[in-house]
């Protein structure tokens, strides 16, 4: 596998601190001499005994568990046009969006900070008609992605697995030529539904303007 895990990155740029100073960790605001404010088990090989680290470049000190939890979740959203029509949209081509999110460690915004999360079924492929309205939805989805509103971490209602990446409140069509799952085409109301769901998250066309 390419890329470093958060634990590997942390270990590389960090020295362990044997005697933590009488200061607070500015991530969790708890004393460095005590445990991290994040709940959950020790993260990937970092025991709670050696729990404070000093960043070699800047000298700042934090709980190791807090640093690992702070790593931004990497992920990718890509899209391109494919030369086929979706059922119900015979007059245009199709936009395919590909989301990829690797598993990682939950951050402060997740249900169990410091605990690992899984990521199933990635890359996930989704489809939009390449029409004016479909392109508008795509523009808004890109904004939603930047704001991290497309996915969240929680319990999958499909699989029952907890601490995993799940679709958030914005529906996507993951089936291309059929509709066996109910997440396919044709679905005449889909684009309007998605625009409503995006609006509920505060994302509207005005948000995307002005553009250059
Ligand atoms: N395609 C698109 N949306 C889906 C799918 C699917 N196959 N399954 C569920 N959803 C929608 C649900 O309608 C709900 O609104 O995602 C929302 C969250 O449902 P969960 O089951 O909790 O989400 P998740 O576990 O992420 O999805 C399960 O979706 O893309 C697939 O590979 C993925 O098979 C997995 C399935
Ligand atoms: Zn801390």
Image (cartoon, rainbow, N blue to C red):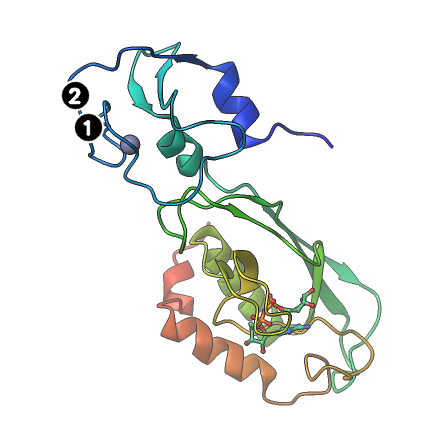
Task: For ligand 2, tell me if the residue under mark 1 lies within 8 Å.
Answer: no
Residue 129 at least partly seen: no
Describe residue 20's horizontal placement relative to residue 5 as left or right.
Answer: left
- Could you tell me residue 16's position as x and y percent? 40, 13
Dot 2 crowding, Cα within 10 Å, few <14, some 14–19, many 20+: few
In the rendered image, residue 99, in percent from the top left (x then y), is placed at 64, 55
Which sits in the foreground, 155 or 136? 155
Residue 79 lies, with reference to residue 140, above or below; the image says above
Q: Which residue is farthest front? A: 49
Q: Which mark is residue 23?
A: 2
Displayed-image quarter of ligand 1: bottom right
Cβ–Cβ under 8 Å for marks 2 and 1: yes
Q: Quadrant of the N terminus?
A: top right
Identify the secondary structure beneath mark 1.
Answer: loop
Q: Distance of mark 2 from mark 1, alpha carbons?
A: 6 Å
**In the displayed structure image, the side of residue 25 where residue 168 appears, left or right:** right
* Mark closer to the chain start, 2 or 1: 2
Callout 1: 10 Å neighbours few (<14), some, many (20+)? some
| Residue that appears at 61% across and 49% down | 101
Which residue lies under the disc numbered 1? 31
Q: Residue furthest left?
A: 22
Is residue 195 positioned above or below 102 on the image?
below
């Amino acid at each position: 596998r390419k890329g470093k895990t958060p634990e590997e990155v942390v270990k590389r740029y960090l020295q362990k601190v044997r005697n933590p100073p009488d200061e607070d960790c500015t991530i969790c605001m708890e004393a460095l001499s005590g445990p991290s404010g994040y709940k959950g088990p020790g993260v990937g090989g970092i025991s709670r005994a050696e729990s404070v680290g000093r960043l070699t470049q800047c000298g700042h000190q934090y709980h190791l568990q807090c640093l690992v939890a702070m790593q931004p979740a990497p992920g990718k959203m890509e899209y391109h046009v494919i030369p086929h029509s979706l059922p119900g949209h015979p007059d245009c081509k199709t936009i395919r969006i590909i989301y990829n999110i690797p598993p990682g460690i939950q951050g402060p915004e997740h249900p169990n900070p410091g605990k690992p999360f899984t990521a199933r079924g990635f890359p996930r492929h989704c489809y939009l008609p390449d029409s004016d309205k479909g392109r508008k939805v795509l523009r808004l989805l890109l904004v939603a992605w930047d704001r991290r509103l497309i996915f969240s971490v929680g319990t999958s209602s499909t699989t029952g697995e907890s601490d995993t990446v799940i679709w958030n409140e914005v529906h996507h069509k993951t089936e291309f030529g059929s509709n066996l799952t109910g997440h396919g085409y044709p679905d005449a109301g889909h684009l309007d539904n998605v625009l409503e769901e995006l609006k509920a998250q505060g994302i509207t066309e005005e948000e995307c303007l002005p553009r250059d």
